[in-house]
Image (cartoon, rainbow, N blue to C red):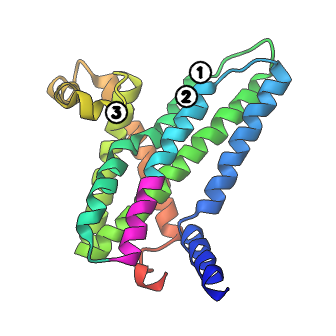
């Protein structure tokens, strides 16, 4: 009887350590707003937000997989490669939800303030998922190669995520396309760098969303310093 209780307690500690419960609560609020909107307006709108939230959850789940392997078998770095690669590929989806604010407009069936709150909590949940998953991955990198390299990794991921949001919003690429058309994605991603004057609005977009991710991540890291290691879990 003690072993099942110990197992449940360990799972609870693991999920709590990785902020699963507040993220789940935030996600529940999104669904309450979504179904509340259906009840109020008698229309099913913004299904794309729910899909985007599902995509935002994927990198978080991949990072939990990496963290679970690291905690159980720290030397099994090779087992962390696949979920880590999937995490990198899907991470921009978490930040992408912020761009769904462009869908905010007056509706006859529901007040605009309701949709503003609905989209905002969904975007916040996406940012929360992006920040927590990066924090987890940075700690793992930190444990392998040190603090400076860990922060270099975090900054690289933040910059690439801002670029990924641009690829998704303007060029309509998604994470699945990395496997299907990698060369085309690389070609498109280089266009703003090759023609900065022609793509100056896109560059501002990339800088803006990179800065948003950076500032929110630094705020979170300031509240939870990187001193705690996985050995204390």
Which one is in front in this view, the residue at disc 2 or the one at disc 3? 3
Q: Mark 2 and 1 residues: CB-CB less than 8 Å, in contact?
A: yes
State the SS at label 2.
helix
Would you identify the image quadrant in which residue 103 lies?
top right
Q: Residue at x 31, y 72 (%)?
A: 142
Crowd class of label 2 (few under 14; some 14 to 19; many from 20; radius 10 Å): some
Report the residue marked by disc 2: 100
* Dot 3 crowding, Cα within 10 Å, few <14, some 14–19, many 20+: few
Q: Going from the N terminus, do you reach mark 1 or mark 3 first?
A: 1
In the foreground, 73 or 164: 73
> Which residue is labeled 1 in the image?
103
| Place of residue 196 in the rendered image (x, y in percent of width and height, measured from the top left) | 21, 26
Residues at discs 1 and 3 in contact (Cβ within 8 Å): no
Residue 176, disc: 3
Compared with 194, 212 (above or below) is below
From the viewer's perspective, tell me whether residue 27 is left or right of residue 57: right
* Mark-to-mark CA distance, 1 and 3: 24 Å
Q: Pick whichever of labels 2 and 3 is earlier in the sequence.
A: 2
Locate residue 58, reporting x and y percent. Answer: 46, 46
> What residue is at 42 percent from the left and 58 percent from the top?
63
Give the magenta range.
61-73
Query: Label 2 vs label 1: CA separation?
Result: 6 Å
């Amino acid at each position: 009887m003690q072993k099942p209780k110990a197992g449940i307690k360990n799972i609870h500690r693991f999920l709590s350590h990785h902020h699963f419960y507040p993220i789940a609560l935030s996600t529940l609020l999104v669904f309450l707003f979504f179904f509340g909107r259906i009840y109020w307006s008698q229309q099913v709108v913004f299904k794309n937000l729910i899909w985007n939230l599902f995509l935002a959850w994927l990198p978080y789940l991949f990072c939990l997989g990496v963290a679970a392997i690291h905690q159980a078998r720290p030397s099994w770095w090779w087992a962390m490669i696949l979920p880590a690669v999937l995490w990198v590929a899907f991470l921009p989806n978490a930040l992408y939800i912020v761009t769904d604010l462009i869908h905010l407009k007056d509706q006859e069936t529901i007040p605009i303030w309701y949709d503003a709150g609905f989209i905002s909590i969904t975007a916040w949940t996406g940012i929360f998922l992006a920040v927590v998953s990066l924090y987890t991955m940075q700690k793992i990198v930190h444990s392998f190669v040190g603090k400076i390299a860990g922060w270099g990794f975090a900054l690289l991921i933040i910059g690439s995520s801002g670029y990924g949001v641009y690829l998704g919003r303007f060029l309509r690429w998604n994470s699945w396309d990395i496997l299907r058309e990698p060369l085309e994605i690389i070609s498109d991603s280089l266009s703003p760098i090759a023609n900065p004057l022609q793509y100056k609005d896109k560059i501002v977009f990339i800088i803006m969303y990179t800065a948003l991710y950076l500032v929110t991540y630094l705020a979170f890291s300031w509240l939870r310093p990187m001193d705690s290691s996985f050995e204390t879990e």
